[in-house]
Image (spheres, rainbow, N blue to C red):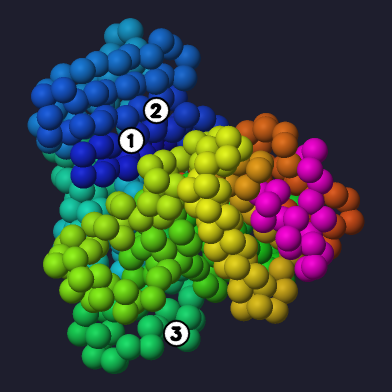
Amino acid sequence: MKILVVNAGSSSLKYQLYDMNDESVLAKGRVERIGMDTAILVHEPTDKPELKEVSEILDHNVAIKKVVDCLVHPEHGVISSISEVEAVGHRVVQGGDLYSESVLVTPEVKAGITSLFDLAPLHNPAHMMGISACEINMPGVPQVVVFDTAFHATMPEKVFMYPLPLRLYKKHKVRRYGFHGTSHFYVSHVAAQFLDKPLEDTKIITAHIGNGGSVTAVMGGKSFDTSMGMTPLEGLMMGTRSGDIDPAIIPFVMGKEGIGPMEANFMLNKHSGLQAISGGSSDMREIVEGMEKGDKGCKLAYEMYEYRIRKQIGAYVAAMNGVDAIVFTAGVGENSAVLRLSILEQLSWMGVDVDPELNKIRSGEPRLITKEGSRVKVLVIPTNEELVIARDTHEIVKKSHK
Ligand code: AMP
């Protein structure tokens, strides 16, 4: 079965075409600057030359039409007809408390995703545009949605509730949901295979550190707690997001600066984090480079970022009363040996014995970076959210055919 995985954002869209016989990727690509006359499409077939095109792509419908054209292109295509695609799997950021697992798209599910627009105004409307575009360009092909929040549906009430007036939860669904669930699920389950224990007995902390970042406490294969909350702003300091701050700062700053809620939200999401403290960059490569050259802003940004990740890991050791393994994944987690070392050297008290040489190796494969005998194992595992989406889609569509 061939499955197209789509991750639709408001002005961009990423895709991968899988052959589920061997879970190989036949092609992947992206469309950027949707809505503009200089939109960019990059199509990368696995065994054929890449196609790059700049053209007018005014909406998601046109974007998906272009993707379909690329997939069947005489020179750059990987299938002879779009009818070979038997299902489409979509990433959806916010499933609220409506969805604890992936589901087949139906009119009710579309209404459900739409009812959550308030909780994810930047993401869910874009996902719906992606779903509609696929329905138009691939009529009759079953579609599945895989939620970033679903893996965290197992968080207990004491973890997901905020200590706020109860009516906010009852009326407006104000609670913690958590994000990056597909990634935390994938890497924690790969990590469990490195442990000599049944999954039910494992305690794993997964650190998904990319542009956005979250740490999850995974107990017995299930999410017990995660650092993001009602929105992806809570928790760690991130590239451009503040993460945890004293909530009283918000009304204080709004008053002092004369800004409204939208501007405050924008500041916390787009003008904070590494970028704010370093004085310009949100990219860990540039922060480390700046720090090595003696830039004070970069040094402070690095130290705050590292400290907040380490503190979160420590908190989850307490939350689970122990830990068997820590996993690093995503852009920074997979690639920044320097950051991993800074964090891990200061976790020696709890039995982390990092091997600095193993930590430096880059392989693109899951690997251990602790010495033999380290009480807590540490792994670097490349995340693969698209594969999880393709697998879920495959399973659900197979079941629906029965
Ligand atoms: P992601 O959101 O997972 O795609 O991660 C993107 C981020 O990964 C970028 O903003 C960079 O800060 C970071 N990144 C990518 N490559 C490296 C690297 N070699 N060293 C440090 N950070 C990296």
Q: Position of residue 267 (x, y in %)?
A: 27, 58
Verify CB contact (< 8 Å) between mark 2 and mark 3: no
Q: CA distance from mark 2 to mark 3?
A: 39 Å
Verify CB contact (< 8 Å) between mark 1 and mark 2: yes
Q: Main secondary structure of the magenta part?
A: helix
Q: Provide the secondary structure element on which disc 2 rests.
A: strand
What label sits on residue 14 in the rendered view?
Answer: 1
Q: Is residue 121 visible?
A: yes
Residue matched to label 3: 157
Q: Is residue 268 above or below residue 284?
A: below
Tell me the residue at 25%/31% (across/down).
Answer: 32
Q: Position of residue 25 (x, y in %)?
A: 47, 29
Tell me the residue at 40%/83% (across/down).
Answer: 161
Does residue 315 show up magenta in the picture? no
On the image, which quarter does residue 251 sit in?
Answer: bottom left
Foreground: 326 or 257?
Answer: 257
Q: First in sequence: mark 3 or mark 1?
A: 1
On the image, which quarter does residue 257 sit in?
Answer: bottom left
Q: Is mark 1 within 8 Å of ligand 1?
A: no
4 to the left or right of 299: left
Q: Amino acid at mark 1?
A: Lys
Q: Amino acid at mark 3?
A: Glu
Residue interval drawn in magenta: 340-358
386 to the left or right of 89: right
Residue matched to label 2: 28
